[in-house]
Amino acid sequence: MSAEKIKTALEQSDTTAIIELLEDKTLPIEEVETIYNAFKADKLIVGQVAMNLSLRTSVYDRDKEYSPVMVSLLIDIASNPVDMGARWAVAKNPHTPVEVLRHLSTDPINLVRALVAANPSTPSDVLEKFFSDDKIVRDGLSGNSNTPPKYLKILCDDNDKMVRMRLAENRSAPKDIVQTLISDSDPDVSKAASANLGERK
């Protein structure tokens, strides 16, 4: 992809071409930043930039694609009022700074809070606050490798099957907690807990 193509798209304010460029997760992060700075008032572009950052990062390889530019973009998007929906991509990104995750933990949209709850970079004092939150938020919490064991133990008795299911599948949950779920009343949860323990041997 040539820098000339990006330059032309920017000069012509060709939104279609710019969105097409942003669909490529190998686009240099500096070019993503250039596009964002030029179009941060455009909801579609802001959303696509957030999606680009999401595509290029992995919760399994948290160092992948880390850069100061990435962090700077995540911080700016989190407070950009143009596209509320873009905040979900920031909430789930493992490179999002802790102070931004703290801010998003009080977001009015429960999906954003759920993604903060599932983010392995979210500190435990923030995670604690999610126990009385909506089901979708507790669901994210039960699968987080960073959730303290004492809270995972509480989630063993959660009324919602999917919360217990995520906990049963959580590879970081202590064995004794997963062991408890083997005798869960729901066969799917029980099966997931058995599989989790089986894979650890």
Image: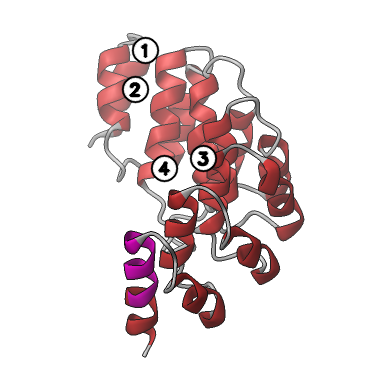
Give the residue displayed 59% in from the left and 45% down from the top: 116
Question: Number of labelled discs?
Answer: 4
Q: Residue furthest right?
A: 125
Q: Position of residue 99 (x, y in %)?
A: 73, 45
Q: In this view of the protein, which residue sits in the foreground, 77 or 139?
A: 139
- Looking at the image, is mark 1 or mark 3 earlier in the sequence? 1
Give the residue displayed 42% in from the left and 74% down from the top: 182
Magenta part of the chain: 187-194
Q: Main secondary structure of the magenta part?
A: helix
Q: Give the mark toward the camera: 3 or 2.
A: 3
Q: Which residue is mark 4?
A: 54
Q: Which residue is mark 2?
A: 7
How far apart are the two marked residues, 3 and 2, measured between alpha carbons? Answer: 42 Å
- Is the residue under label 2 in contact with that under label 1 (CB below 8 Å)? yes
Decide: is 62 above or below 83: below
Q: Amino acid type of disc 3?
A: Ile
Decide: is 46 above or below 95: above
- Looking at the image, is mark 1 or mark 4 earlier in the sequence? 1
- Say what secondary structure mark 4 lies in: helix
Describe residue 149's horizontal placement relative to residue 94 as left or right.
right
Q: Position of residue 45 (x, y in %)?
A: 41, 20
Q: In this view of the protein, which residue sits in the foreground, 106 or 200?
A: 200
Quick check: is 167 in the magenta stretch?
A: no
Q: Which residue is mark 1?
A: 11
- Is the residue under label 3 in contact with that under label 1 (CB below 8 Å)? no
Work out which quarter of the rendered image holds the C terminus and state it. bottom left
- Looking at the image, is mark 3 or mark 2 earlier in the sequence? 2
**Quarter occupied by residue 194:** bottom left
How far apart are the two marked residues, 1 and 4, measured between alpha carbons? Answer: 26 Å
Q: Which residue is mark 3?
A: 136
**Quarter occupied by residue 176:** bottom right
